Image: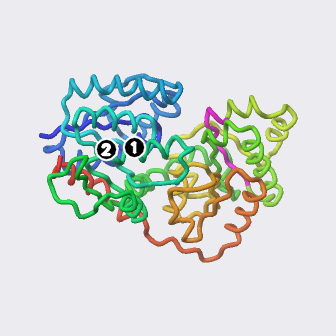
Amino acid sequence: MKKIITIIGARPQIIKSAALSRAIKTNYADQLKEVLVHTGQHYDEQMSEVFFTELGMSKPDYNLNIGSGSHGSQTAEMISGLEKLFIKENPEAIVVYGDTNSTLAGAIAGSKMGIPIVHIEAGLRSFNKSMPEEINRILCDHVSTLLFSPTKTGVDHLKNEGFKVDNIAPFNADNPKVYHSGDIMYDNSLYFSDIAAENLTTHQELDLHYKPYFLATVHRGANTDNPEKLKSIFEAFLEITENYPDHLIVLPLHPRTHKCMETHFSEEFHQKIKDCKQFKIIPPVSFLTIISLEKNCQLVITDSGGLQKEAYFFKKPCVILRPETEWVEIVEQGVAVIADADKNRIVAGVEKMMAQKGAEFPSLYGDGKAAEFIAGEIVKWC
């Protein structure tokens, strides 16, 4: 039996790993043993712990408990801790997801020890190297042995960077294998959609069965840590409530955003937000609840890459609170618009998306069996 170590650290990675763990248990339990390692990058119970229970996942075999810190110190601690674990466990491969510091640390530690790196969500690019995530994903791709891209666009990005899609085995970091695998988050959205339909607590508490609403999230440091950008986003939210008086804006508030609102906003502006009855600010919610909110909302306004895709999965238009997106397909399809943190562009973006009739959402992210495919390829080549 082959042993793999899966590295997670941030909330989205926990969710993504649920799909692969499920595929291994269902189809490859006699061929793959998965050791789950949590770096501790997201250590708040609402942002991490609750997800293991809700998604039916086993608790991590190891937790490094790194916590927050500067990019350098956090990544360095992770590399050191992971190296010791890799020596102890001696895996055949390391599985990493996406573009966090946990991803980069796993890729650096494993590759320097000659352990094959399996990168899920390979090939995504924002072409903005001021984003730490962009640095992480590029570096990770270039030391990986198996690269699973959720989209054709991702494969094209890798080809443009010199990757060859026709390499033949044996595969290694110098001769990697590139796949267009589909998106494991689409797997999860399909799998948990019916379960989420039964999760109505939040809707009942907010009286959302009887009111149309927009779902909003704001968490990226480029928005939260910049007082002007953060205020511009919330000014846009307030204007949207004026333009759509019969709609609510539901905002599950990320801890970082909450802290920055307290720091950056004047008492008068903060009170104005609190007094707006159409603005429902709630604590962070679980994955099943966010899916339920997405399925029933009119539109999504977000700086989250994951929610951009999930909006598409559930055929909801999306206004993107970033200057670019890795998921260019949804913009090209005309069901999402990039607004950055610009108040006027956000308001105009909502108006444009709401005015659309008969928008189409063709299948762009696979058939819902990406995790099963990925697990099979790991068995075959690692």
Q: Amino acid at mark 2?
A: Val
- Left or right side of 134 for 183: left
Amino acid, disc 1: Leu
Relative to 81, is 347 on the left or the right? right
As for residue 261 lying within the magenta part, the answer is no
Q: What is the distance, in whole Å, between disc 1 and disc 2 at their CAs?
A: 7 Å
| Circle 1/circle 2 CB separation < 8 Å | yes
Observer-nearest of 349 and 316: 349
In the picture of the structure, the residue carrying the numbered disc 2 is 143
**Residue 213 coordinates in the image, percent (x, y):** 68, 56
Q: Residue at x 20, y 28 (%)?
A: 89
For disc 2, the neighbor class at 10 Å (few under 14, some 14 to 19, many from 20) is: many
- Identify the residue position indicated by label 1 in the image: 139
Range of residues picked out in magenta: 248-257
Is 78 on the left-hand or right-hand side of 43?
A: left
Tell me the residue at 27%/22% (across/down): 84
Q: Which mark is residue 371?
A: none
